[in-house]
Amino acid sequence: MLDNIVAALGNMVSLEMFLCMFAGVAVGIVVGALPGLSATLAVALMLPFTFGMSPTAGILILVGAYCGGVYGGSITAILIRTPGTPASVATVADGYAMTKKGKAYEALMGSLLTSTIGGLLSGLALLLIAPLIAKLAVNFGPPEYFALAMFGLTIIASVSGKSLAKGMMMAGLGLLFACVGIDPYEGQARFIFGQSFLYSGVGMVPAMIGVFAIAEVFNQIEIRIKSVAAEFGDVSVDCKQKFPLKKLRPHLPNILRSSVTGIIVGAIPGTGGAIASFLAYNNEKAKSKHPEEFGNGSMDGIIAAETAKNATTGATLIPMFTLGIPGDTVTAILLGALTIHGLSTGPKLFTEHGVLVYTVIIGFFLVNLIMLVQGRFAIRWFSKITQVPSSILLPIILVLCLVGAYASNNSFASVGIAVFFGVLGFILGKFGFPMALLLIAMVLAQLTEMSLRQSLILSDGSPLIFVQRPICLIFLLLAVFSVCIPMLKARRARKAGKSS
Amino acid sequence: MLGYKKKMIPTAVIMAIDAAVFFSIPSQVKIYEEGLVNTRFLPYLVTILIFICGIADLIKTFRERDKGEEEKNYFNKKGTLRVLAAVAALAVWLLLMPEIGFVISTVLLSAFIMLLAGNRSAVQILVLSLILTLSVYALFKLALNLRLPQGLFFF
């Protein structure tokens, strides 16, 4: 291992490598920030450029686009309540609330620094304990995936706000929307109503664009604010102010816990940044002494979501390098890139191409540091948004969203779906329905249904399978505590309020 | 006091749509074989869950009717009309874009949205709509190599 690391360090001292990482991160941040586009698209866009490069340079440009893309979504989530990627949905509420309070720079810098820390820690996990984590990930079968999905859905209890019933209705709606299309298990069409465009289902990206961005555009057209600054006071993003690292010291336990969450979830194939960010957010809210602040501009909420989200980036490379299994679409593209360059993929990648693997791992650390530098410039440019008059900003956001929705599936139907969800988000948002839960449920729906049905088939219909496997049981118990503890705390607070 | 009835409307509407979906399951979701856990399992589970939660929400709203909250106006009339106009504009854009192309339809859409948002400067509306549309076109078509509908005039 040490020989490979030394050789890898030698490979990194190269202008080509540095330029590749720099370009990859830059493209990733811009594409990730644009609603409707995603880290996956950023990676896919960079793929053709890698054909003429060395395998290492090619992989590093893709890793740069991946890390930049995952981080980039949080910039627009914080500034204009429009998450660039599904993984940034958990950041929207607290991030935008901080912007309205004039603390956008703090939110953006907190997001950038903790994303970088999460990425670096996941790189460390990749370097030191990849085989161990891969062994744990391989033990995840359908019951464990179901338990993980249930644990993820318990976020309903904490994000529902005043009305758990409304929260559960939104989660139910999200699960129902996710049923539209082809059943992932039997291939039967569900709720098509004779419309061919519904065969591909209701996409997550158009739904996200509609619920957050288009609904917000409608809100602003309705109340006709002059600009974010005019409506909420001085929200100008002062990029000259300092944000020293020591500001994050009180949040260190949060950062470490959320990184661990991100690393473990990221190492499990088929999960991803969105699930990790929701889980970490939920966990921190449950542990917080001020849970009422979550959703209203809590720095802890932003830190938890952002750290966990970027901590998945290194972790998703673990099953790819150790087992040759792509954990998600991005790692599938990375494996494809390796194949294009004539390298054999599979469990022997680590042993047969050790120098390349370690070069990529060390490059991963550098990519995160480059992201830190580029992120500061990106913040400076994107932050001017709050000063732009709404009559100019709203059409810009709307057009980008509509084109983004179109680009997600190359289909007009996706744009129609985005507008539908925009109207739904506008109307239901007025009556206190938490729309974020609709999206969370859509993210988790396929995992929940597939794993439940597969588990029951494995156990011949017996639900005992969920309590007979230790990892599954642990997640289910965590899910139960996650729901019961906030309810007990709320009941105790109500009793204390009544008696005083 | 009557404000609580207004609060109940969205929940009631969701429950009504949910009931319609529940009864449409046998026709909309075909199954290969009978059994508890099949293609219809999740739709049935979820529609029942939504209905039960809807009832819980209605009961909660009814119980809290005497809390003395001020009757809230959820939608302001002029604002709602502007939003309806925006939705109509989006529908027209969706219909026109394949015919007249991305650039022309988007310039018209952006100009209309700027008007709705309160901009009254003809120069700003025209110039910014053009710049926005052409920038987005360049970004998606040339830089990101994504196909955008061409329409009659090849752009």
Image: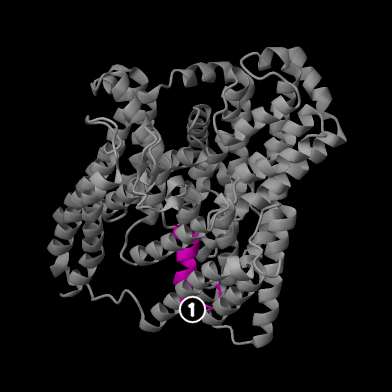
State which region is magenta.
A210-227
What main secondary structure does the magenta stretch of the protein show? helix
**What quarter of the picture does the N terminus of chain A occupy?**
top right
Location of residue A181 (image quadrant): top left
Q: Determine if the magenta segment contains residue A499.
A: no
Q: Which residue is painted at 67% across and 16% down in the image?
A: A350
Crowding around mark 1 (Cα neighbors within 10 Å: few <14, some 14 to 19, many 20+) is: some
Viewer-proximal residue among A49 and A221:
A49
* Residue A69 position in % (x across, y down): 63, 45
Seen in the picture, residue A288 relative to B107 is either above or below; the reply is above
The secondary element bearing badge 1 is classed as: loop
Tag 1: amino acid: Arg
Query: Is A215 in the magenta?
Result: yes
Q: Quadrant of the C terminus of chain A?
A: bottom left
Residue A17 percent across, percent down from the top left: 81, 34
The residue that mark 1 highlights is: A224
Q: Quadrant of residue A147?
A: top left
Q: Would residue B145 appear left or right of B47 to someone viewing this image?
A: right
Residue B97: image quadrant is bottom right
